[in-house]
């Protein structure tokens, strides 16, 4: 009972919500906002970017509190989060995945490989950066980018 009384006395403690992002929102989908469903595509990553994306959606950085949520199907998605250089085997699946995402939609390239081929530039199995295969609306540079950067990019899409 003493513990319950202490809990009642303390009340609910939570940090203040951060200010809404001031960065411009992606022009491809100004209608999106509030709640954005995100499908992740690994087009040829080393998995470093995936580790940071997992952190971005984990309990510490918690992209979910800004309205971004990972979904399993591109048909349920508003945004594609693409990591890695695009390998020959993934160019077609990446195009087909984007085709399956209903408009309006945005494509976010995450990591140096996705933005400009990074350390894999010139490798024999590489088609190119994500922007060479599908239109990219937002880029998050870094090798790998920090979870804060991934969350900040997603907040410009959700507007929260
Ligand atoms: S940007 Fe760095 S961490 Fe991300 S896939 Fe490329 S090499 Fe790996």
Image (cartoon, rainbow, N blue to C red):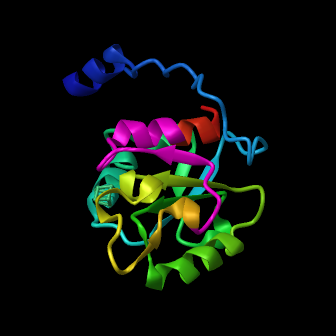
Residue 124 at what x, y percent from top left? 34, 79
Along the viewing direction, whichever of 141 and 126 lies nearer the viewer: 126
Q: Residue at x 35, y 42 (%)?
A: 147
Is residue 39 something that shows in the picture?
Answer: no
- Quadrant location of ligand 1? bottom left
Q: Quadrant of residue 42?
A: bottom left
Q: How many marks?
A: 0
User: Extreme front residue here?
Assistant: 122
Using residue 127 as the reference point, say whether residue 92 is left or right of it: right
Is residue 81 something that shows in the picture?
Answer: yes
Quadrant holding the N terminus = top left
Q: Residue at x 34, y 56 (%)?
A: 118
Q: Residue at x 55, y 36 (%)?
A: 155
Along the viewing direction, whichever of 79 and 11 lies nearer the viewer: 79
Q: Is residue 24 above or below residue 36?
A: above
User: Extreme left residue here?
Assistant: 2
Residue 150 at what x, y percent from top left? 43, 43
Residue numbers of the magenta segment = 133-153
User: Extreme top residue here?
Assistant: 9
């Amino acid at each position: 009972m003493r513990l319950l009384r202490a809990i009642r006395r303390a009340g609910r403690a939570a940090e203040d919500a951060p200010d809404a992002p001031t960065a411009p929102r992606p022009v491809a989908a100004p209608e999106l906002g509030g709640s954005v469903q995100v499908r992740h595509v690994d087009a040829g990553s080393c998995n470093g970017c995936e580790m940071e994306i997992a952190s971005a959606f984990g309990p510490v950085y918690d992209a979910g509190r800004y309205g971004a949520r990972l979904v399993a199907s591109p048909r349920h998605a508003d945004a594609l989060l693409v990591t890695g250089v695009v390998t020959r085997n993934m160019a077609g699946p990446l195009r087909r995945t984007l085709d399956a995402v209903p408009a309006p939609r945005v494509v976010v390239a995450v990591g140096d490989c996705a933005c400009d081929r990074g350390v894999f530039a010139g490798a024999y199995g590489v088609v190119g950066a994500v922007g060479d295969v599908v239109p990219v609306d937002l880029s998050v540079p870094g090798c790998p980018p920090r979870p804060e950067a991934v969350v900040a990019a997603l907040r410009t899409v959700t507007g929260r």
